[in-house]
C-alpha cells in the first residue's frame, strides 16, 4: 500500500521522534534542518518511510553533534567555512562523511 504524506507532516513526524531522544533545542534544530533538506531533496520519496528506524539510526549510529569543545570542531569548522554543508569525505581526516547542518556554532555531522 502506498500512502502519501505532505512534507510538513513528514517533518513533524520525524521531529516528534527526535524529541524523544533529546530535549536540547539546538540539537533538535540541527536535525530539523537535516530532515527538511532530505524531504525537499526527495530522499524519502521512493522508499519505506519508517520514522523510528530513520531517526533512531541517525541519532544512535550515523550522526553526531559537534560543538566547539570537541576535538574535531576546528577541522569541521574549517571545512564548513571553505565549502559549506555537504560531502566532506575527501577533506576530513577524522572520517566524517558529511556536514548535515549548522546552528549556533554546532554542527551535525554524518559518519
Image (cartoon, rainbow, N blue to C red):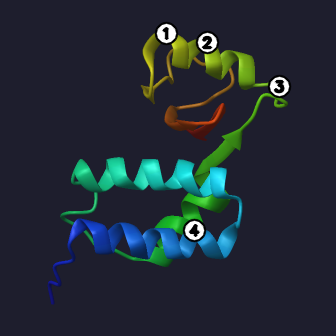
Q: Is residue 36 left or right of residue 108?
A: left
Q: For numbered disc 2, what is the local secondary structure?
A: helix
Front one among 104 and 39: 104
Q: CA distance from mark 3 to mark 4?
A: 25 Å
Determine which residue is flagged by label 4: 18
- Closer to the N terminus: mark 2 or mark 3? 3
Q: Is residue 109 left or right of residue 13?
A: right
Image position, residue 71 (x, y; %): 82, 25
Kindly identify the residue that appears in the image at 40 percent across and 72 percent down: 12
Q: Is residue 28 left or right of residue 68?
A: left
Front one among 27 and 97: 27
Q: CA distance from mark 2 to mark 1?
A: 6 Å
On screen, residue 69 above or below 110: above
Determine which residue is flagged by label 3: 71
Determine which residue is flagged by label 2: 78
- Please tell me how crowded label 3 is: few (under 14), some (14-19), or many (20+) other residues with Cα within 10 Å: few
State the quadrant of the N terminus: bottom left
Q: CA distance from mark 1 to mark 3?
A: 19 Å
Amino acid at each position: 500500500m502506498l500512502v502519501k504524506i505532505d512534507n510538513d507532516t513528514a517533518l513533524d513526524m520525524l521531529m516528534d521522534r527526535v524529541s524523544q531522544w533529546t530535549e536540547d533545542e539546538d540539537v533538535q534544530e540541527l536535525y530539523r534542518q537535516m530532515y527538511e533538506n532530505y524531504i525537499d531533496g526527495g530522499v524519502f520519496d521512493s522508499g519505506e518511510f519508517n520514522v523510528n528506524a530513520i531517526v533512531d539510526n541517525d541519532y544512535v549510529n550515523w550522526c553526531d553533534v559537534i560543538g566547539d569543545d570537541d576535538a574535531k570542531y576546528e577541522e569541521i569548522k574549517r571545512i564548513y567555512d571553505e565549502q559549506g554543508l555537504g560531502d566532506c569525505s575527501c577533506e576530513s581526516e577524522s572520517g566524517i562523511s558529511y556536514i548535515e547542518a549548522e546552528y549556533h556554532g554546532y554542527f551535525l555531522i554524518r559518519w
